[in-house]
Image (cartoon, grey):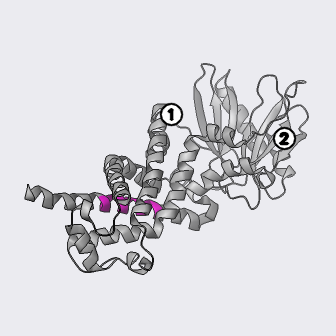
């Protein structure tokens, strides 16, 4: 759109804007008011999203720069020592920290039902014991971005995500150029009244990145309805019939080794302890080529009686529904594209911040003439 036409559009009353049908004008009005109503929340979500893209690496770097090759037997000895420190406690899961293959979080449940975690290097050396009342900035940002620091906030985040997705679509419809005007629409005006130039920049920048932004917003929103969406499309969980216990279960080291040996080239990302009445370790590894680079999503079930592998469920061979649900997280965070993808995720977050600020400024500039006229 040329400078003169943009300036003309800004000066005219919305109902008389040249080339706009009543439907298009209504869409623009809805888009504007939705943006203003949710601007602060979207801004906070965008800023926290940018801040936590590399939260795994930041959290680990803050604790220690040491690295040790993963030694499952040494980690099992550390687990035994932790249980001895708190008689009656039990380990529920072990997860990799997400930043590398040689750091793990051991999650324990005390006799009082309270949960705690201990972070260790690959050789079992303890590098962190968070206190129950301890709050750290990166964890606070992650929790705020996910669910506003509480389960009730999860619904707000979900509803906000739906509004953001719908608003991005409305904005795209409102800004869609007519045939033959794409080059001008994608090139911001350099001259003309401030409001006209701001509108031109808002429209051009919006058109350049609205589709990747919509993908990130949509995948994040779908994750808030993960159980319902998964059920709707027929995504099935990984499970087998219960395996009756036949004595004391094998230890963590045997279960972990069986899991990584079953998938050549993989790295361990999770082990969940057997539940009552089912002698099965549920393990998770990151297999070569997976787009979930931090945690992977190849699942294995290990017999806690014998150490035999009961089942291997590679995500690369999963049915489309489970593969789709598994892909939501790495696409939303950008890790599907490795380092480049995560940097692009930050860029989209910055784009959203820019669009929110520019949109609010544009609305304020449009209201000033009307206020002076009154």
Q: Is residue 212 visible?
A: yes
Q: Residue at x 42, y 63 (%)?
A: 351
Left or right of residue 364, residue 94 in this image: right
The x, y position of residue 312, in whole percent, is 84, 46
Q: Residues within 10 Å of mark 1 (few under 14, many from 20)?
A: few
Q: Quadrant of residue 81?
A: top right
Q: Residue 368 bears which disc, if any?
A: none
For this rendering, which residue is in front, 98 or 224? 224
Q: Which residues are magenta?
A: 348-359
For this rendering, which residue is in front, 224 or 6? 6
Mark 2 vs mark 1: which is more N-terminal? 1
- Position of residue 242 relative to residue 28, above or below, is above
Q: How far, Cα to Cα, is label 2 from label 1?
A: 30 Å
Q: Residue at x 56, y 54 (%)?
A: 332
Q: Main secondary structure of the magenta part?
A: helix
Q: Secondary structure at mark 2?
A: helix
The C terminus lies in quadrant: bottom left
- Position of residue 48 relative to residue 277, above or below, is below
Q: Residue at x 82, y 27 (%)?
A: 278
Q: Secondary structure at mark 1?
A: loop
Examine the structure image and report whether residue 125 is included in the region drawn in magenta: no
Examine the structure image and report whether residue 352 is included in the region drawn in magenta: yes
Q: Residue 254 bears which disc, if any?
A: 2
Q: Is residue 53 visible?
A: no
Left or right of residue 320, residue 82 in this image: left
The x, y position of residue 37, in whole percent, is 32, 46
Residue at image mark 1: 131
The N terminus lies in quadrant: bottom left
């Amino acid at each position: 759109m040329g400078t003169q036409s943009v300036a003309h559009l800004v000066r005219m009353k919305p109902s008389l804007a040249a080339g706009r049908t009543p439907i298009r004008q209504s869409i623009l009005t809805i888009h504007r008011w939705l943006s203003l109503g949710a601007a602060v929340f979207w801004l906070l979500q965008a800023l926290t999203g940018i801040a936590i893209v590399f939260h795994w690496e930041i959290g680990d770097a803050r604790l220690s720069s040491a690295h040790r090759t993963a030694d499952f037997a040494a980690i099992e000895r550390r687990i035994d020592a932790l249980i001895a420190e708190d008689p009656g406690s039990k380990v529920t899961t072990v997860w990799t920290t997400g930043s590398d293959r040689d750091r793990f979080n051991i999650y324990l449940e005390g006799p009082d039902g309270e949960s705690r975690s201990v972070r260790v290097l690959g050789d079992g050396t303890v590098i962190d014991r968070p206190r129950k009342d301890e709050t750290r900035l990166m964890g606070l940002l992650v929790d705020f971005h996910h669910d506003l620091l509480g389960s009730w906030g999860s619904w707000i985040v979900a509803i906000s995500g739906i509004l953001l997705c719908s608003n991005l679509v409305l904005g795209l419809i409102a800004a869609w150029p007519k045939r033959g005007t794409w080059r001008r629409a994608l090139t911001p005006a350099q001259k003309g009244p401030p409001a006209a130039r701001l509108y031109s920049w808002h429209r051009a920048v919006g058109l350049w990145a609205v589709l990747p932004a919509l993908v990130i917003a949509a995948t994040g929103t779908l994750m808030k309805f993960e159980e319902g969406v998964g059920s709707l499309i027929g995504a099935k969980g990984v499970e087998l019939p219960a395996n009756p216990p036949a004595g004391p279960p094998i230890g963590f080291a045997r279960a972990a080794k069986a899991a990584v040996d079953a998938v050549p080239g993989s790295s361990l990302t999770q082990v969940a302890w057997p539940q009552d009445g089912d002698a099965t370790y549920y393990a998770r590894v990151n297999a070569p080529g997976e787009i979930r680079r931090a945690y992977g999503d190849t699942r294995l079930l290990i017999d806690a009686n014998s150490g035999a592998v009961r089942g291997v469920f590679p995500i690369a061979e999963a049915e489309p529904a489970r593969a789709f649900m598994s892909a939501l997280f790495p696409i939303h965070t950008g890790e599907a594209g490795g380092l480049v993808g995560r940097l692009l995720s930050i860029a989209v977050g910055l784009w959203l911040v820019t669009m929110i600020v520019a949109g609010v400024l544009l609305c304020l500039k449009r209201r000033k003439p009307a206020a002076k006229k009154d």
